[in-house]
Image: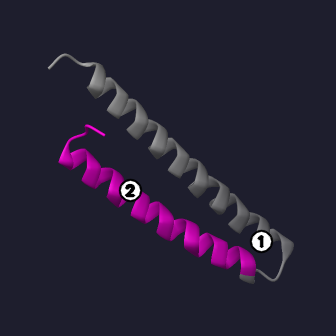
Amino acid sequence: MDESPELRVLFHRLNNQLGIILAHAELLESKATDDMNRARAAQVVAGALDAMLTAKEIRRQATSSSESEPT
């Protein structure tokens, strides 16, 4: 992977924060006592997973575009 150290740090920080959100949402989902709160927590889980996939795709595209640039 040929990305700048600054970009690598930003992706690392973003993934760490999304991981925290995901972990808390999964905990809330598992401890929810009613369907409405469980569904809300499930939406947060789905959103966090989608955001993680989006960050991964952005990273992939940024890396592939930097590899195709002339040096």
Q: Residue furthest left?
A: 71
| Residue at position x 48%, y 61% in the image | 18
User: Residue 9, located in which quarter of the rendered image?
Assistant: bottom left
Residue that label 2 marks: 14
8 vs 43, left or right, is left
Residue that label 1 marks: 38
Q: Amino acid at mark 1?
A: Arg
Read off the magenta span.
Answer: 1-30
**Quarter holding the N terminus?**
top left
Q: Position of residue 8 (x, y in %)?
A: 27, 49
20 relative to 11, above or below: below
Q: Residues within 10 Å of mark 2 (few under 14, many from 20)?
A: some
Judging from the image, what secondary structure is the residue with disc 2 in?
A: helix
Q: Position of residue 31 (x, y in %)?
A: 73, 83
Q: Position of residue 63 (x, y in %)?
A: 33, 33
Judging from the image, what secondary structure is the residue with disc 1 in?
A: helix
In the image, is residue 61 part of the stretch drawn in magenta?
A: no
| Residue at position x 45%, y 45% in the image | 55
27 vs 59, left or right, is right
- Identify the mark nearer the N-term, 2 or 1: 2
Q: Amino acid at mark 2?
A: Leu
**Quarter holding the C terminus?**
top left
| Residue at position x 67%, y 77% in the image | 28
Q: Residue furthest top?
A: 70
How many marks overall?
2
